[in-house]
Image: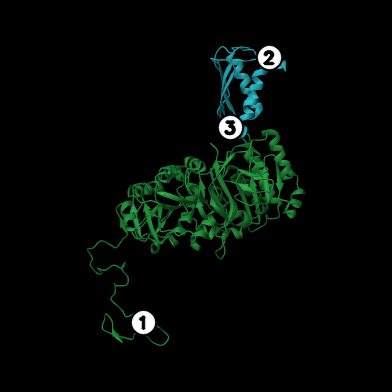
Chain colours: A cyan, B green
């Protein structure tokens, strides 16, 4: 999968997260993290995002995260949706995993 | 023998009376009494001054003194910022601020701390920008956090000596009789301010609504008041109170409330003539609703409700389900109207409410209290002051006062907020010690302090989901994950005083 435009998923409701995936001008996964629990869970959130991007086979992207205390499962789901949108893929094959 | 001012021979002393002071004239020893008696065209005697600045000058406020405010206007308060700006312009420095509490609206204080106008703070709570500022170590002296009862004790015992109290009041007459339920900025009870009015050296009232003398019934008495200033507005009504506090529709809060009501009903404390207090948080308010349904069904009435009075409590009072209300702080418009109209909705001072060292405070007569918590640990210690990031964003309030005074203290809280667990190994800051906390009710289960074997046995006989507090902690961590430990600097930015005046915990500067 390759990021070709900007994809957004999520909301700014409590316990949710808004994730924007866009092209990265340089290489690698560039994470811009704003979280209300950054001090307690910042490392964990970055780890979850890196792992998910590896799983989606994306090596270059800017991931902007505005987190309102979402659980790991929520972060994964929002990131996946945003990434598919950023890659311009409309039909997600949910059953793959 | 000497002749007094009306030419009578008066002995200098006499058996049974060491010295006698001869009469010196009707006005000499009572300078405040009207001197032009009988002159009808003079203005009536009053204590009115034109501006806050004049009042500050008259009180002879000087560097290093202690000033106080109350927080009955909550987030609508104009008084503290108004007075602090004038004090700052007058160049007075190094003041101790002994406010009953501080809210979001007081963030301007940051400026006055930076410029050295305020160098020491006593308060029940800190929030918003001010909480951030203090937590980041930007004030030299630590803030002292006290409970409502602890503040009343400190003021009555002289541990806090207030030189000048600036008290915003919704209505006053020209002589200083004032109450909280008349006028466009009505706030209800003036329970915190009553302590300041009684014990401060000088008392300045600031109001936006003047009424005819005498303004009865009054909360602050004319004999306590030095000066009165009329201003355009003492506060923003929208920030002072909400309409009627509504019952939450949040299903999680309703579940917690239902469980909490069940706990009360099965605890052994639910009997005719019991007394209770609930906080104004979503789950606590809803607890009152579920409890009242059971009261009607079982024909049980409460002898009194304490608080923190809301429209919920007022409705029960007006239905006869709660015989009397004792009110130190009034939360919404319905309750504000009630304190003016209902004969047995009685205003009480913070000392009457919770001072542990007076001759008997109301929390001692309390059977059931429902309280909220930011965090609770496996020793049942409760934190209501620092967030999970270590920053001060709450208030001690009456938490520790009511927890220890009541027969059974029940903490209601969701097990997880966002991804922050409420039940933890060690709370960030202890406001209320675990030995005074009896039951924790969450949306995922209930834990009873092992100290309360009687309550545990009664609750085990029900179908309520009872766990140990360690089990609840594990449940929370499984979902939310284990947070990294918050790092702090060595500097102590706040002292947490227990209601008796001892220091129960300290709050350190957060690492930026």
Q: Which mark is residue B20?
A: 1
Q: CA distance from mark 1 to mark 2?
A: 103 Å
Label 3 and label 1: CA atoms lie apart by 75 Å
For label 3, the crowd category at 10 Å Cα-Cα, with few meaning under 14, some 14 to 19 and many 20 or more, is some
The residue drawn where x is 55% and y is 13% is A5
Q: Secondary structure at mark 1?
A: loop
| Horizontal and vertical percent position of residue A47 | 65, 25
Q: Residue at x 55, y 40 (%)?
A: B510
Q: Are marks 1 and 2 on the same chain?
A: no
Report the residue marked by disc 3. Answer: A38
Nearer the observer: mark 1 or 2; the answer is 1
> What x and y, as percent, mark residue B75?
46, 44
- B77 vs B24, left or right, is right
**Dot 2 and dot 3 within a common chain:** yes
Q: Is residue B17 left or right of residue A96?
A: left
Give the tally of numbered discs.
Answer: 3
In this rendering, which labeled residue sits more in front, label 3 or label 1? 3
- Answer with mark 2 or mark 3, whichever residue precedes in sequence: 3
Report the side of B309 relative to B271 (left or right).
Answer: left
User: Does residue A18 appear anywhere in the picture?
Assistant: yes
Residue A8 at x, y percent in the picture: 56, 20
Q: Which mark is residue B49?
A: none
Residue ID for mark 2: A93
Q: Residue at x 32, y 52 (%)?
A: B53
Q: Nearer the viewer, residue B264 or B469?
A: B469
- Tag 2, which chain? A
**Residue A83 placed where, x, y %?**
60, 17
Q: Residue at x 62, y 53 (%)?
A: B403
- As measured in the structure, the alpha-carbon distance from the residue carrying label 2 to the one carrying label 3 is 32 Å
């Amino acid at each position: 999968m390759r990021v070709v435009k900007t994809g957004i998923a999520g909301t700014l409701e409590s316990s949710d997260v808004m994730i924007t995936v866009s092209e990265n001008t340089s290489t690698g996964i560039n994470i811009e993290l704003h979280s209300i629990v950054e001090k307690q869970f910042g490392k964990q959130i970055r780890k979850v995002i890196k792992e998910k991007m590896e799983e989606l086979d994306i090596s270059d992207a800017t991931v902007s995260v505005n987190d309102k205390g979402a659980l790991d499962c929520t972060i994964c789901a929002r990131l996946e949706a945003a990434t598919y949108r950023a890659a311009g893929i409309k039909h997600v094959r949910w059953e793959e995993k | 023998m000497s002749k007094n001012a009306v030419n009578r021979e008066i002995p200098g002393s006499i058996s049974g009376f060491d010295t006698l002071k001869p009469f010196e004239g009707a006005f000499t020893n009572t300078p405040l009494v009207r001197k032009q008696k009988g002159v009808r065209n003079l203005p009536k005697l009053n204590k009115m001054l034109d501006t806050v600045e004049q009042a500050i000058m008259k009180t002879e406020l000087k560097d290093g003194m202690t000033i106080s405010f109350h927080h009955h206007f909550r987030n609508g308060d104009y008084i503290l910022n108004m007075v602090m700006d004038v004090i700052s312009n007058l160049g007075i420095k190094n003041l101790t601020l002994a406010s009953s509490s501080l809210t979001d609206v007081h963030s301007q204080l940051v400026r006055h701390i930076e410029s050295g106008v305020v160098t020491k703070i006593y308060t029940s709570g800190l929030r918003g920008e001010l909480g951030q500022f203090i937590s980041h170590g930007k004030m030299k002296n630590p803030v002292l956090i006290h409970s409502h009862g602890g503040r009343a004790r400190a003021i009555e015992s002289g541990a806090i000596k207030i030189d000048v109290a600036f008290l915003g009041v919704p209505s006053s007459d020209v002589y200083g009789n004032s109450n909280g339920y008349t006028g466009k900025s009505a706030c209800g009870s003036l329970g915190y301010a009553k302590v300041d009015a009684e014990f401060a050296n000088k008392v300045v009232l600031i109001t936006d609504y003047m009424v005819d003398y005498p303004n009865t019934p009054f909360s602050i008495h004319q004999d306590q008041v030095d000066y009165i200033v009329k201003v355009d507005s003492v506060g923003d009504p929208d920030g002072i109170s909400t309409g009627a506090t509504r019952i939450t529709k949040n299903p999680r809060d309703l579940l917690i409330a239902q469980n909490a009501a069940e706990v009360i009903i099965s605890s052994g404390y639910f009997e005719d003539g019991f007394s209770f207090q609930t906080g104004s948080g979503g789950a606590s308010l809803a607890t009152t609703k579920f409890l009242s349904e059971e009261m009607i069904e079982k024909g049980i009435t409460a002898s009194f409700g304490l608080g923190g009075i809301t429209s919920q409590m007022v409705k029960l009072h007006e239905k006869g389900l709660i015989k009397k209300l004792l009110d130190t702080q009034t939360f919404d418009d319905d309750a504000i109207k009630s304190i003016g109209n209902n004969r047995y909705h009685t205003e009480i001072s913070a000392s009457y409410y919770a001072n542990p060292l007076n001759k008997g405070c109301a929390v001692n007569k309390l059977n059931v209290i429902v309280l909220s918590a930011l965090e609770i640990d496996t020793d049942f210690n409760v934190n209501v002051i620092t967030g999970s990031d270590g920053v001060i964003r709450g208030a001690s309030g009456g938490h520790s006062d009511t927890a220890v005074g009541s027969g059974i203290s029940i903490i209601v809280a969701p097990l997880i907020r966002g991804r922050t667990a409420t039940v933890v190994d060690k709370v960030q800051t202890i406001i209320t010690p675990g030995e005074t906390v009896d039951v924790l009710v969450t949306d995922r289960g209930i834990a009873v302090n092992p100290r309360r074997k009687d309550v545990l046995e009664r609750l085990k006989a029900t179908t309520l989901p009872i766990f140990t507090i360690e089990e609840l902690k594990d449940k929370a961590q499984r979902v939310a994950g284990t947070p990294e430990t918050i790092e702090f600097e060595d500097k102590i930015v706040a002292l947490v005083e227990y209601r008796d005046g001892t220091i129960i915990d300290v709050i350190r500067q957060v690492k930026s």
